[in-house]
């Protein structure tokens, strides 16, 4: 929807923000009704199609306006390099040089949306103090205006499409001056023409008509790449987009059949582009022939970038639910759909892997439907390999009686997901109102279906590997810990968040009779199946030698000799603790493992500096030394792996001291709750590069043989 700011105070506020900050373009995003989505409400300085991929933005998306609204902070991008580094998905779709700021619209009491401003190429690397103040003031004004304009119950005003505000002209001229300007252009060598921001001809000189080879009345109101077949290459539209966004002069050269090379120089501003066309004497070589009217027109640059934008998003998906969430939260809003169904093809049937906006009975009606069934549009799409587009309930009712009433949807796009001729699933985008799918939208959705199919296929393989890793890890770690008289024990394991969900950290608690136990913890090099297998060998060896009655030092020495004989080219750290339950005496021996911690009854925590010993699996004849301590009632012995304390670039001793401080400051709770408190800062770490294992042995205040 296009129109002047007129009596629209929000539109006037956006134009004022552009004027006071010197921005070349701007847009206001507000929350969509009952969806975690921002929709573009007002924009100026750019054609509406440029922002089409971002007319609806999921709040969870890694896109500047979403980050600004979600985190309630200013996002500044000083140029294309920073955009590629911080927001690669956006950079893929807008590969031009410009600066942008996305700011939360609010007054300190909550975010009402986000204001997006763009500056031409060449802006300073940072916002000036004056620009920051103007931007902050604009966000406060817009927040007040949005609050005043909200309807009953606080609902935001509905808008079918963004309101596009033209930038006021620099000046207006009278008829005499306009005629003088036309005469001036006619006298220039070559040809001159003007394009509006949408890329349509608004003026052509006689020289331009001759050079372009088309009548003036056919050119006016048309876009060059639509009216002139030899300019239909997306590269030419791309140059126009580059000029509009960067506000820089952009040249390009094209061949007008059969042999005339023309040079175009585009000079943009906020209202359009001035284009100077001149003949070129240089021959730039052969080019692909222009498509004839009967041939399919090449994809437009905007369409290509839209697909690239969504493709970049799909590359971020890892597991199946990642793909489902991305389609639901970002692709569905981008196409304005109100519902989504995703199926995976498994064992000759369709299995529902995700849905949004569908009633439960509609989901259940097609769950597990056979791929040979005839009553499912998803099955038909997979059988033919062709997408289907239903624009009205009548079209669906004709082919699938009862479907519109069951689903409550009036239009849908049914996209088969096929990889190398093999069906992997189906994605359905649905609409509550009748909808016409343009040819461009059909092409984009068809291209997107192939990308979703590849992402889903990769994700299913990843999930299979993850499940295998999880099962292997579960088989190698203890399923439970034995009860220990006089002690309460807790153990935790967290896998690394990078790579497979499997690692080499291990722990064990071994009953050696009525009067003694052994606790062991270790960390094998690596995070893969080989590390897990080596971990299983180490844990088994320690348990065997401990059960045979070997002392702590002997347990490590014999385990080390065995692991060296197996020659796995891996090594492991290990800490072994033997505890006499009658005397509460603990004998500890270590093999290159982080030192244990002891929280005393007065809650003072000390680091136990036992002889470190050599890692197991390095030197077959290595010797180990044991240290004895007493575990008084209400004391806690903490055994852990380095994943709990190590941080890249941090001093290991400082990290151990920090863990001791956390243990020292923890409240007097049982070991289960205490273990959770010690792991809090690691459990939510999205970039955990190492496994974490933790075992706590809390000496109870009762007699030494009282069960826990």
Image (tube, rainbow, N blue to C red):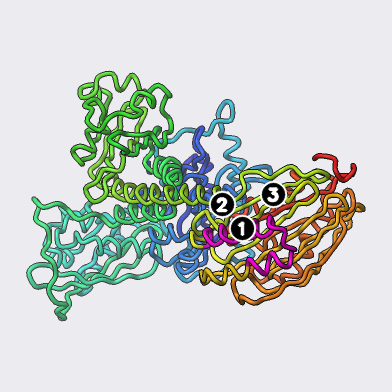
Q: Which residues are magenta?
A: 531-559
Residue occupying image coordinates x 41% and y 50% = 166
Q: Is residue 647 above or below residue 338?
A: below
Marks 3 and 2, the one that precedes in the sequence? 2
Image position of 461 (left or right of 665): left
Where, quadrant-wise, is the N terminus in this rendering?
top left
Q: Is residue 5 visible?
A: no
Q: CA–CA distance between discs 3 and 2?
A: 15 Å
Disc 2 target residue: 476
Q: CA–CA distance between discs 3 and 1?
A: 16 Å
Task: Say which quarter of the image contains residue 286.
Answer: bottom left
SS of the residue under disc 1: helix
Where, quadrant-wise, is the C terminus in this rendering?
top right
Disc 3 target residue: 491
Of the pair 313 and 531, the residue shown nearer to us: 531
Q: Is residue 501 above or below residue 155?
A: below
Image location of residue 189, percent across then percent down: 20, 75
Decide: marks 2, 1 in contact (CB < 8 A)?
Answer: yes
Of the pair 455 and 410, the residue shown nearer to us: 455
Image position of 673 (left or right of 37): right
Q: Which mark is residue 539?
A: 1
**Magenta run includes residue 537:** yes
Image location of residue 316, percent across then percent down: 44, 54
Decide: marks 3, 2 in contact (CB < 8 A)?
Answer: no
Q: State which mark lies toward you, 3 or 2.
A: 2
Toward the front, the furthest residue is 548
Toward the bottom, the furthest residue is 282
Marks 3 and 1, the one that precedes in the sequence? 3
Image location of residue 241, percent across then percent down: 33, 61
């Amino acid at each position: 929807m296009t129109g002047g700011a007129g009596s629209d105070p929000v539109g006037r506020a956006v134009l004022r923000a552009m004027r006071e900050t010197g921005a070349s373009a701007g847009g206001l995003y507000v929350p969509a009704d009952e969806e975690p989505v921002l929709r573009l409400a007002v924009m100026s300085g750019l054609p509406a199609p440029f922002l089409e991929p971002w007319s609806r933005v999921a709040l969870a998306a890694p896109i500047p306006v979403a980050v600004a609204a979600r985190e309630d902070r200013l996002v500044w991008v000083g140029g294309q390099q920073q955009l590629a580094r911080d927001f690669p998905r956006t950079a893929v779709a807008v590969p031009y040089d410009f600066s942008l700021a996305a700011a939360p619209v609010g007054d300190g009491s909550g975010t009402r949306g986000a204001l997006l401003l763009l500056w031409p190429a060449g802006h300073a690397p940072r916002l000036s103090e004056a620009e920051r103040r103007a931007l902050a003031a604009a966000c406060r004004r817009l927040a007040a205006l949005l609050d005043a304009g909200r309807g009953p119950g606080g609902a935001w005003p509905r808008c079918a499409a963004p309101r596009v505000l033209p930038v006021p002209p620099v000046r207006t001229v009278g008829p005499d001056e306009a005629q003088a300007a036309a005469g001036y252009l006619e006298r220039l060598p070559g040809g001159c023409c003007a394009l509006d921001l949408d890329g349509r001809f608004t003026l052509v000189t006689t020289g331009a008509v001759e050079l372009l080879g088309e009548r003036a009345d056919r050119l006016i109101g048309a876009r060059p790449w639509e009216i002139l077949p030899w300019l239909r290459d997306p590269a030419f539209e791309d140059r126009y987009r580059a000029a509009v966004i960067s506000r820089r002069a952009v040249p390009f050269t094209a061949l007008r059949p059969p042999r005339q090379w023309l040079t175009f120089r585009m000079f943009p501003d906020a209202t359009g582009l001035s284009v100077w066309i001149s003949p070129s004497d240089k021959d730039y070589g052969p080019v692909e022939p222009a498509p004839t009217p009967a041939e399919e027109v090449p994809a437009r640059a905007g369409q290509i970038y839209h697909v690239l934008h969504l493709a970049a998003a799909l590359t971020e998906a890892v597991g199946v639910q990642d793909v489902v969430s991305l389609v639901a939260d970002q692709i569905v809003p981008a196409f304005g759909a109100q519902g989504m169904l995703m199926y995976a093809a498994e064992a000759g049937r369709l299995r529902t892997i995700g849905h949004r906006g569908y009633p439960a009975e509609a989901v259940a009606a097609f769950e597990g439907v056979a791929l040979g069934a005839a009553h499912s549009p998803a099955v038909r799409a997979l059988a033919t390999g062709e997408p289907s587009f239903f624009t009205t309930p009548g079209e669906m009712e004709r082919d699938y009686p009862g479907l519109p009433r069951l689903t409550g949807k009036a239009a849908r796009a049914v996209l088969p997901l096929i990889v190398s001729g093999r069906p992997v699933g189906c994605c359905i985008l649905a609409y509550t109102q009748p909808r016409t799918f343009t040819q461009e939208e059909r092409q984009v959705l068809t291209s997107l279906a192939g990308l979703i199919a590849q992402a889903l296929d990769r994700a299913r393989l990843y999930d299979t590997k993850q499940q295998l890793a999880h099962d292997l890890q579960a088989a190698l770690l203890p399923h439970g810990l034995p009860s220990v008289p006089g002690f309460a024990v807790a153990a935790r394991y967290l896998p690394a968040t990078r790579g497979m969900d499997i690692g080499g950290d291990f722990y064990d608690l071994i009953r050696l009779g009525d009067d003694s136990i052994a606790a062991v913890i270790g960390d094998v090099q690596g995070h893969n199946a080989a590390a897990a297998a080596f971990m299983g060998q180490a844990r088994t060896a320690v348990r065997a030698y401990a059960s045979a009655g070997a002392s702590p030092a002997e347990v490590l020495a014999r385990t080390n000799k065995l692991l060296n004989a197996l020659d796995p080219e891996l090594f492991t750290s290990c800490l072994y603790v033997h505890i006499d339950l009658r005397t509460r005496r603990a004998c500890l021996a270590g093999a290159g493992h982080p030192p244990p911690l002891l929280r005393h009854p007065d809650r003072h925590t000390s680091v136990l500096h036992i002889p470190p010993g050599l890692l197991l699996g390095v030197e077959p004849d290595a010797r180990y030394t044991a240290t004895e301590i007493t575990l008084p009632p209400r004391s806690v012995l903490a055994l852990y792996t380095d994943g709990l304390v190590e941080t890249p670039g941090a001093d290991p001793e400082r990290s151990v001291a920090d863990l001791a401080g956390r243990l020292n400051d923890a409240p007097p709770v049982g070991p289960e709750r205490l273990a959770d408190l010690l792991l809090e800062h690691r459990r939510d770490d999205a970039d955990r590069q190492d496994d974490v294992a933790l075992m706590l042995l809390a000496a109870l205040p009762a007699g030494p043989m009282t069960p826990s």
